[in-house]
Image (cartoon, rainbow, N blue to C red):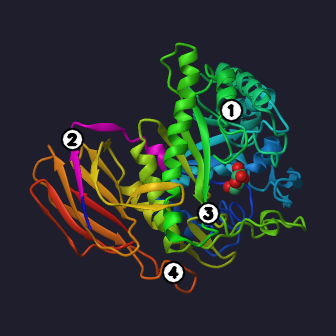
Amino acid sequence: LKSRIIADKDFIVAPLDRRVFGTFVEHMGRCVYGGIYEPGHPTADADGFRGDVLALTRELGPTTVRYPGGNFLSGYNWEDGVGPKEDRPVRLDLAWGSTETNQFGTNEFMAWVRKAGIEPMFAVNLGTRGPAEAQNLLEYCTHPGGTKYSELRKSHGYPEPYDIKFWCLGNEMDGPWQTGAKTAYEYGRIATETAKVMRWTKGDLQLAACGSSARTMPTYGAWEYEVLDQCFDQVDFISLHQYFENHENEVDRFLTVIDDLESFIVEVAAIADAVAAKRRSAKRIMLSVDEWNVWYRARSGEQLRSATWEQAPKLLEEIYNFEDALVVGGALLVMMNNADRVKSACIAQLVNVIGPIMTETGGPAWRQTIFHPFAQASRYGHGEVLRLNIDTGSFKAGNQDAAPLLVATAVHDAETGQATIFALNRSTDQEMALSAELRGLGERALAEGLELHHPDIKAINSKDDPDQVAPTAHERVAVEGETLSATLKPLSWNVFVTR
Ligand code: AHR
């Protein structure tokens, strides 16, 4: 099987917005408690943040982190999570059937993101609450002082305002499972009014409206149109949520879920542009895929909600295998290849709950299989995404009659001269002879070649065997002039860094 890529330095899709390498921390299961925060853990610092999780987070390399939910958000009172810890109320979390102690809240989160070196992405509750509470939270976080909520922040020991720019207006408001779910019109109106008061409070915000919870929602399409028809002038982004599954246990179908993501992106952009066209507006609403990942094993009733109001129960602790890592890598390629519209994305979630990082409470932390393609994409995904001409074979599976066997992305960083090719061979049985011409980039040398492959697609990483699935140096790659040649194993994820 032969595949050919032609790229040209001057033919670009768009500069890659590094916010596509975001992640998500929700008050859910053991993501916060037992994940990023565990006072008393052997690696915990004075703030109670797990040092092992912080180190793995830095290695994973997320650029932004969405907080505090998720479905949790839609019943959350942010005031419960600030001020002296001993005064914070213990609450029922209706979204996950859990008990929320509120020992971790806004200021702890901001301390954690600073230590992790990540930009925060906050979300406001538009389920049980509305514009006033959103504005109060924004004032608490970002106003310098002299007002009720900015002085409250100072009294809690945080004299300096936080410069939090990216805010999500609610979460999955189209979902009947959501506390305070709304019709598209109701949500579009409350998003508009919330955005107005937030913008009047702080001028340089980026605001994201909720799109559909999934492309399979019955209201999909009509939802995006109506919501944006209401709030088009007030928002910068519309969100997409995409969770992939492999219930049928068919690897070739599973690998085409990334083509469905491509359709999702193209469709939502088209709907946003239809709303713009109706207004004769040149404004373009950007896409924020602010929840995405593989998630299907831990999706049954008892794993979704704790029946016992436990604190930090084990929820959605999906154990990822090698084929999941291929899908996660492929999804990253699709998002990078749509860099002109996808300017933000969050792998959901960061740790324990459908997370690339796994921990044992009181014990170690390790990298799940999906950790690796994400870490590599974030590490090497800098610069402009090049428009690729790809000549490859195809296969028929899932919704796709002719899915390309090779999925690839090339990014070129003009400042450093680095050009990276990410290549996913989706053939289940054929090696691929790849030739990639990087026209106009001058003589290239291979700086790094990496391969993620395992002969068993169901191989997992675990506490006792944390590196079963891990990248290795690529053994079959060479660069001559502007052309890179490599042999890609069947079902493999490959990264080639050239300078
Ligand atoms: O990430 C898990 C859950 O998935 C989130 O809370 C919700 O927004 C989505 O349905």
Is residue 89 covered in magenta?
A: no
Q: Which residue is mark 3?
A: 245
Q: Which numbered disc, 1 or 4, marks the residue closer to the eye?
A: 1
In the rendered image, the quadrant that contains the C terminus is: bottom left
Instruction: Give the residue at x 76% y 38%.
Output: 155
Q: Counting other residues with Cα less than 10 Å from the Cα at mark 2, is it few (<14), some (14-19), or many (20 or more)?
A: some
**Type of amino acid under label 3:** Glu
Q: Is residue 259 visible?
A: yes
Give the magenta part as a residue range: 4-21
Q: Quick one: 448 or 58, which is closer to the camera?
A: 448
Q: Rounded to the nearest whole Å, what is the CA distance between mark 3 and mark 2?
A: 36 Å
Q: Which residue is mark 2?
A: 9
Q: Which residue is mark 4?
A: 459
Give the side of residue 396 with respect to residue 156, left or right. left
Q: Which numbered disc, 2 or 1, marks the residue closer to the eye?
A: 1
Instruction: Give the residue at x 64% y 26%.
Output: 228
| Mark 1 CB near ligand 1 (8 Å cut) | no
Q: Rounded to the nearest whole Å, what is the CA distance between mark 2 and mark 1?
A: 39 Å
Q: Quick one: 356 or 64, which is closer to the camera?
A: 356
Q: Which numbered disc, 4 or 3, marks the residue closer to the eye?
A: 3
Q: Position of residue 9 (x, y in %)?
A: 21, 41
Mark 4 or mark 2, which has the lower sequence index? 2
